[in-house]
Image: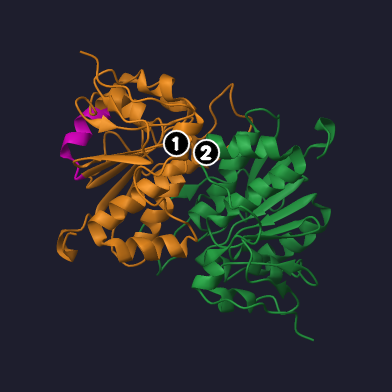
Chain colours: A green, B orange
Amino acid sequence: MASESTHPKHFGLLVYPGFEALDAFGPMEVVNDISLSHNITLSTIAETLDPVSTIKKGKHSAGQSVLPTHTFEDAPALDVLIIPGGYGGFETTPKLRQWISDTVPKLGTLITVCNGASLAAQAGVLDGRSATTNKALWKECVAYGPKVNWVAKARWVRDGNIWTSSGVSAGIDATLAWVASEYGEEFANNIANGMEFTRASSSTDDPFSTLFQCADVPPQA
Amino acid sequence: MASESTHPKHFGLLVYPGFEALDAFGPMEVVNDISLSHNITLSTIAETLDPVSTIKKGKHSAGQSVLPTHTFEDAPALDVLIIPGGYGGFETTPKLRQWISDTVPKLGTLITVCNGASLAAQAGVLDGRSATTNKALWKECVAYGPKVNWVAKARWVRDGNIWTSSGVSAGIDATLAWVASEYGEEFANNIANGMEFTRASSSTDDPFSTLFQCADVPPQA
């Protein structure tokens, strides 16, 4: 548990067309709640400042749009970056991958949600790491990271300063687990209780890896 | 369970400054997932078309902004309306309350999340109904609805076509319960599994009413 003065100040949320609503806004709820008692900033970062929709064309007929605050060019230095998944996270642009590979080494903490891990893997930042990702689309997601040690039975995986979560709502558990490591369990539990959210009992509390019959995928030689 | 042809087509999300991120985007995740297999529309409705922030000034230092698609003046006729709570939901404008009181009688279904019920109560549309709301701020929330039968031990309450949920993440359970009633349990469970979300076992599966020592509040004579 870090002392107050060393707590992270600058949070970032990466968004792109077709990001998954709850992948982003589960962790954002936690970040917003941190901001009730800690003076932090949150940058919503995208390729341009145009509104970014959750709609993946050809997939969804309904969605919401968020307004970025920064582009890849003018995003501030970040302590914590959250990368959501979504149907749009499979088709990335070179610019997006470059920004991730440039940014992650300078972060204090990276949190990926769902196939946000596939996106991070495409940028190479999960190479040699243990990670998890979406369980319903497990095989499709892990294929993007041949150099990653993919752990199936995991609500989330922590490998050093990189936290990867299972699908969609698991991002809330991963973010709360990171909050507990940074600010203490009591603080994390208070946020969870305020959200009326029952936390996963541990990082391996993952019924969905069983439901979707997911198996570990070690890095390819 | 309604037949395909009678399923709702037009969904609306009400937003206002200081709405709670997960109150809105938990149910929105479910709506977006419905839209993967059903052709629906989602209108994001606010007092103006300006971006609407989750930040309640003086409370949060971090937040996100969503872009409305419609104002109260040009919002289309809706089948389903979702009203999130949030610190901004306690201080409503006459225009907001008027829109709610004009709109709700014409809806197929109203879903409120957290103190979205307090907002609906201020507009009078919960008078004579049973409802629930946020548990951490129970007494503050129920005070806005003196003519409402407030049920404490409830993840959600259904009273006819009005579904009210407990705090924040409970909105996901309430929306999935409504989905089950409208499209069937299998469809609702498939969405929940895709979200890797473990549904509350029933409408009374609510540990937070105990944690926060909430008691029923009947309507005042």
Q: Is residue A6 above or below residue A133?
A: above
Q: Mostly what secondary structure, the magenta segment?
A: helix
Q: Is residue A194 left or right of residue A55?
A: right
Asked if the magenta segment contains residue B93, the reply would be no
Q: Is residue A63 left or right of residue A21?
A: left
Q: Residue A13 location in percent, x, y? A: 63, 49
Given residues B114 and A22, the one toward you in this image is B114
Q: Is residue B221 left or right of residue A167?
A: left
Q: Say which chain tag 1 marks.
A: B
Residue at 27% x, 21% y: name it: B218
Kind of residue at disc 1: Gly
Kind of residue at disc 2: Met
| Image marks 1 and 2: residues in contact by CB distance under 8 Å | yes
Q: Residue B130 location in percent, x, y? A: 25, 31
Asked if the magenta segment contains residue B107, the reply would be yes
Reading the image, the residue beneath label 2 is A195
**Residue B167 numbered mark, or none:** 1
Q: Residue A112 location in percent, x, y? A: 65, 58
Residue at 56% x, 51% y: name it: A24
Quarter of the image with the N terminus of chain A in it: top right
